[in-house]
Amino acid sequence: MNETAVTPIILCQGVHKSFGAVPVLQGVDLEVRKGEVIVIIGPSGSGKSTLIRTLNRLEPHDAGRVIVNGVELSDDLKSVDAVRREVGMVFQQFNLFPHLTILRNITLAPIHVRKWPAEKADSVARALLERVGIAEHADKFPAQLSGGQQQRVAIARALAMQPEIMMFDEPTSALDPEMIQEVLEVMIELARSGMTMLVITHEMGFAREVADRIIFFDEGRIVEEATPDVFFNNPRHERTKLFLSKVLER
């Protein structure tokens, strides 16, 4: 488990979000300390993805406060840009540019957003490809890689911006079963390196192994949060017990 600081790097206070008349987040309170690995689980449609999308303003919240790395998110574009520079996002779909090489996919943002010289961006990108185990594919195009390899490129691309926080929205759900482990191994290494991470996943083994806390989300609310040992072995809420009985028997 990670040593964590006292000051939250992410703070949500009474966060609400609706799509039309449908409430999606209903008064979410959450603190994440630097270096923590938080795994968020829950049924489909419970608001998990919406929650992490509010943390870099991909979805504006309707009420409450969201503070990320000391910056409160609002309609002010400067605050949004400041947060997005420090938050890496990895989604279900890889969202790689198909017409660019793997190396170019990774160096694009550091060159244009961080204003790095091409030589620095290239060096960092190659080191990251080595870290995620696909250095030999730098000059290939996305279509030439497997799904698992493309998702590892997506992780490297997010890391290239040297974020303070990494967020993963079900990063293995679009992968064939045999490709899931190769992506999880990269995420496990990242968690053990001390990166602050929020991970939405149905991979319970991953949650047991690396989470500092597991949060169970349902109907737009945090129903339960606990360490993996307590969460899996002694959950308090009946809703949590019902969910675990279904996912653990698979």
Image (cartoon, rainbow, N blue to C red):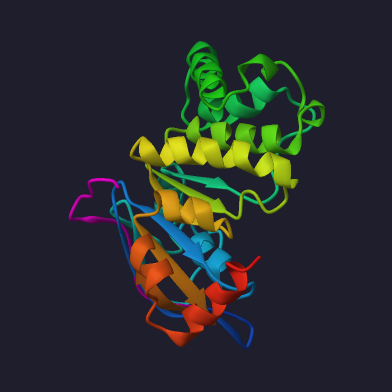
Q: Residue furthest top?
A: 119
Q: Residue furthest left?
A: 6
Residue 80 image position (x, y, % from top left): 45, 53
* Residue at image point 63% right, 32% down: 153
Q: Is residue 119 visible?
A: yes
Question: Which quadrant of the view contains residue 212?
Answer: bottom left
Left or right of residue 177: residue 207: left
Q: Is residue 64 visible?
A: no
> Looking at the image, is 195 positioned above or below residue 55?
above
Left or right of residue 114: residue 173: right
> Looking at the image, is 175 positioned above or below residue 242?
above
Q: Is residue 14 magenta?
A: yes
Question: Which quadrant of the view contains residue 233?
Answer: bottom left
Question: Which quadrant of the view contains residue 178?
Answer: top right
Residue 189 image position (x, y, % from top left): 44, 35
The C terminus: image quadrant? bottom right
Q: Relative to the observer, which residue lies in front, 200 or 154?
A: 200
* Residue at image point 39% right, 76% down: 235
Residue 203 image position (x, y, % from top left): 57, 55
Q: Which residues are magenta?
A: 1-16
